[in-house]
Amino acid sequence: MEQRITLTNLKNNTGNKILTLAEFVLSVASTKNVTSITGAGGIVIPVLSIVLSFVIGAAQPDYNPVKQTISQLVYYPQGWLQTTDFVVLGIWLILLALKCYANFATRTTTKIAAILLGFLAVGFLIIAICPTTFPGKELTARGLIHEKTAEAICGLFPFICCLLIPELKVKHYWHKLVKYTFVTAAIGFVLGILGGLIIVRGIPTMGFIERLIFLNAVIWLVVIGVTIILQKPVAVKN
């Protein structure tokens, strides 16, 4: 009996510590400095990701951006920059997810969206740790993890946008982004389906579709970053 009580107390104490840590993290995410960093990151980091992948790819005479994916840039001399970019993007998305949960979410759907955004952020860290399989080589375990994680990221993004729409409708200034977010989600779903068909049929244009998917997300993230900087989300008064 004493052992059971001890184990129960241990579980309760561990649970309380986890809750305390979560409350601390969310309180930090609510600070003005984190808001500024998150907003500025939304403007700079996604754009930098696009520019960086273009510059690295353009510097390689044998790299074909239509056929080859962004992830394959890691095998070129400047590939470490692409890996670093994945890490930075993942860390910033974690901040965005925390900010969304701490300051923006008043609905269950938005909280779910924030949690999924956190998973998406971790996905970028995973694809940085597990590079894609070298072109022309047999699929490796790390390459498979990279491939499935990238597919999950592409699928999660438009779904997250859809979950955010009910919250956007009742936020001052943010409600202006409802239609744009819906269009972004629709484009994301369509491009995701096209990407799946390209993979199944073996059409050598995955690089092109992937860049469209990434560009669609980047533009939306930049708009979110600008909105965070310019406005504070306030509920619309009925």
Image: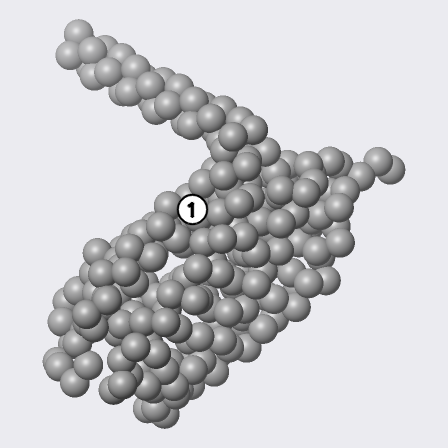
Q: Quadrant of residue 148?
A: bottom left
- Say which element carries label 1: helix
- The x, y position of residue 72, in whole percent, is 26, 74
Residue to which mark 1 is pinned? 92
Residue 22 in the figure: left or right of residue 80: right
Residue at image point 54% right, 52% down? 43
- The x, y position of residue 117, in whole percent, is 46, 50
- Residue 118 is at least partly visible in this image: no
Count of number-bearing discs? 1
Residue at image point 56% right, 29% down? 32
Residue at image point 49% right, 61% down? 47
- Residue 42 is at least partly visible in this image: yes
Most distant residue in the top direction: 2
Name above or below for residue 72 compared with residue 23: below
Assign the C terminus to one quadrant of the image.
top right
- The x, y position of residue 189, in whole percent, is 54, 72
Assign the N terminus to one quadrant of the image.
top left
